């Protein structure tokens, strides 16, 4: 734990993007003119960066759809097997239902006890028919990109001595971290720079790692990072990822850690 004097911390995040991306979105000072002048691509939309990665590194539409289908199937299988049950806290919420014909609204109480974004019926034919968001010559579709999702996640971090003193058995051990930057127009390929730094810092090699979790913002960047790093496909995102589970920003780290710990 990097903060001095802290032996136990809870690290977490929450995302309510459904309440943000609407007509009431606050755009005040959304961009810094000084940053924009120095680095024009800094505020490039993420979907545009995904198109850049697809074209720059020749990640075909077929490869992206194939990976996305794999993600959907892996999540469906994991949910059927109950593999996410221990990492999810049931939330009781009130849902607003809008009648499409009359426009009338009603409310009903529901218990959210599983991630709702998975589409088990996804197939290759359906993915191939989806139109690219950015135009006919684009690659990114609603099927090979992550979904806008609400959610929250938290992890308890504790010094080993503190856990031992309390008689707690750790679920996993935090070995280290590394930060690396890349050009803003290819936002999603940061892992190809960060992973080698982390391995060197921890004295590990690629062969020492049994399971990998890479954020699935877009299929193109996962495919590129997987192939560049040499990650075996069978060891990567074994229960799916943001494409099939959802992509609540500020939550991805906790989701990934929980998923890996559960599988391990």
Image (spheres, grey):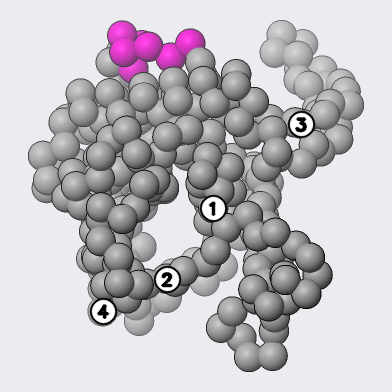
Q: Earlier along the polypeptide chain: callout 4 or callout 3? A: 4
Q: Nearer the viewer, residue 83 or 162?
A: 162
Please state the extent of the stretch shown in magenta in the rendering: 121-127
Disc 3 target residue: 112
Identify the disc placed on residue 257.
Answer: 1
Picture coordinates of residue 239, whole percent (x, y):
48, 33
In the image, which disc is placed on residue 126? Answer: none
Q: Is residue 34 visible?
A: yes
- What is the distance, in whole Å, between disc 1 and disc 4 at their CAs? 35 Å
Marks 4/2: CA–CA distance = 29 Å
Q: CA distance from mark 3 to mark 2?
A: 32 Å
How far apart are the two marked residues, 1 and 3, measured between alpha carbons? 21 Å
Query: Which residue is rendered at x = 19% and y = 47% of the image?
Result: 230
Q: Position of residue 12 (x, y in %)?
A: 66, 61
Secondary structure of the residue carrying numbered label 1 = helix
- Return the residue at label 2: 177
With 59 as the anchor, is 257 left or right in this view?
right
Report which residue position mark 4 lands on: 38
Q: Quadrant of residue 202?
A: bottom left
């Amino acid at each position: 734990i990097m903060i001095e004097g802290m032996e136990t911390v809870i690290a977490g995040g929450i995302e309510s993007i459904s309440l943000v991306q609407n007509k009431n979105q606050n755009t005040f000072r959304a961009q810094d003119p000084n940053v924009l002048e120095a680095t024009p691509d800094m505020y490039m939309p993420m979907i545009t960066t995904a198109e850049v990665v697809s074209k720059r590194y020749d990640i075909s539409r077929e490869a992206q759809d194939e990976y996305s289908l794999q993600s959907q199937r892996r999540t469906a299988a994991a949910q059927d097997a109950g593999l996410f049950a221990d990492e999810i806290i049931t939330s009781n919420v009130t849902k607003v239902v809008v009648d499409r014909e009359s426009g009338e609204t009603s409310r009903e109480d529901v218990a959210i006890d599983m991630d709702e974004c998975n589409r088990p019926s996804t197939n290759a034919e359906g993915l191939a028919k989806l139109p690219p968001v950015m135009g006919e010559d684009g690659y990114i579709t609603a099927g090979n990109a992550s979904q806008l999702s609400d959610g929250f996640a938290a992890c308890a971090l504790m010094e080993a001595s503190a856990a031992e003193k309390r008689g707690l058995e750790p679920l996993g051990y935090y070995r280290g971290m590394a930060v690396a930057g890349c050009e803003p127009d290819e936002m999603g390929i940061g892992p190809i720079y960060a992973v080698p730094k982390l391995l060197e810092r921890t004295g590990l090699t690629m062969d020492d790692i049994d399971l990998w979790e890479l954020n699935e913002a877009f299929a193109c960047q996962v495919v590129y990072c997987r192939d560049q790093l040499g990650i075996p496909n069978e060891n990567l995102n074994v229960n799916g990822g943001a494409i099939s589970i959802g992509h609540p920003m500020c939550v991805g780290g906790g989701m990934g850690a929980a998923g890996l710990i559960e599988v391990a």
